[in-house]
Image (cartoon, rainbow, N blue to C red):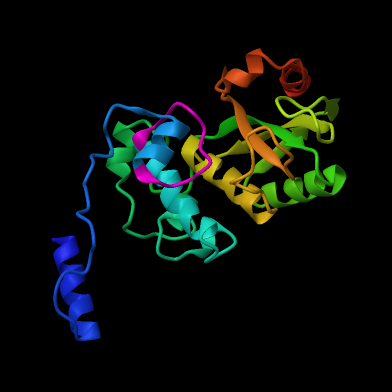
Amino acid sequence: TLLSSYVRAIQKQEGITGPLFQKHTKAKPLIDEIEIEPAYWNTTFGTKISISEGKSYLETCVEYVHQNPVSSGLVKKPDEWEFSSFRDYLGLREGRLIDYELLRKSQLLNVENRHPNSSGGTINTVIIGIGSNIEVEKNIVQMLTILKTHVKVVTVSSMIRTKPIGIKNQAEFTNGAVKVQTILNKIELNQVLKAIENEMGRDRLALKFGPRCIDLDIVVWNGKIVDEDYYTRDFLQKSVKEITD
C-alpha cells in the first residue's frame, strides 16, 4: 500500500506513467531471530556500513536508518535529519515514528512505562571505552566536551598508550574509559556515540583496525560487561577497574 501510494503520487507529480522501481522490493520482519554479521549485511544488501558483530536484525536496521543521512552526506549528525526517529529516541521531539511497544518487547527499550520526553526513568551507569591515534589530545578533549551535552560524565580514567592491533604500520593508540550516567537506553546511547564519532570525522569505510580520530564503545552497562574485547585487552581492563566503584 505504501509503495503503491508513493508511485501514484510521483507519477502525478512528474506527469509520467509506468513502473517507478526497477526491481521488486522485499519486506522482511524486523523481529527475525538472526544475528547480523558485517559480511551478511554487505552481501545481502549491497551496502557498506560499519556495525558491530552479533547485533539483532532490528537493532542493526534502526542504526542503519539513523546513520544513513550522515553516511549520504545530507547532514553531519543524525539528530539534524528531521525525517527519522533519532530525535524521538533522544527525547528531543514527541513524534509518532517509534513503535515503543515493539522496542520494549525486543528488549531494546529498557525504560518502563514512560515516553522518552517525560521526567523520571531509569538511570543507567555506563562505562565507555575510548580510543584514538589521530591528534589524540585534541580529539579526546573535543569528544568529552560533546559527550557532556548528552549524558552526565562522572569520571574519566587515565589514558594509556598502546601498540596498534592488526595493522602495525600506524601511530600508537591512546586508550582509556569514561563513566557516565544517562536515562538513555543502550541503543539510544550507542546512537549518540556513533553520532559523536561521525561529527568528529570518523571514516566508516576505513579498515577495521586502521587509524581513527575517535573510537567509542560501550564496555560496561549497569555493572555488566557487554563488550567481549574487555576480556582480551589488558589496557581496557585497567581503565575500567580504575573508574569502577
Determine the residue positioned at 64% across, 38% down.
207
Determine the residue positioned at 84% across, 31% down.
172
Determine the residue positioned at 55% across, 65% down.
75
Tell me: 143 left or right of 80. Answer: right
Residue 108 at what x, y percent from top left?
Answer: 40, 35
Magenta segment's dominant SS is: loop
Count the marks: 0
Residue 169 at what x, y percent from top left?
Answer: 81, 32
Tell me: 209 left or right of 117. Answer: right
Which range is magenta? Answer: 45-57
Q: Is residue 194 placed above or below 39 in the rendered structure?
A: below
The quarter of the image holding the N terminus is: bottom left
Residue 21 at what x, y percent from top left?
Answer: 23, 64
Determine the residue positioned at 14% across, 65% down.
4
Asked whether residue 118 appears in the rendered view, the answer is no
Q: Is residue 49 magenta?
A: yes
Closest to the observer, 209 or 110: 209
**Location of residue 242 (image quadrant):** top right
Closest to the observer, 168 or 227: 168
Tell me: 241 left or right of 126. Answer: right
Q: Is residue 50 magenta?
A: yes
Residue 49 at what x, y percent from top left?
Answer: 50, 44
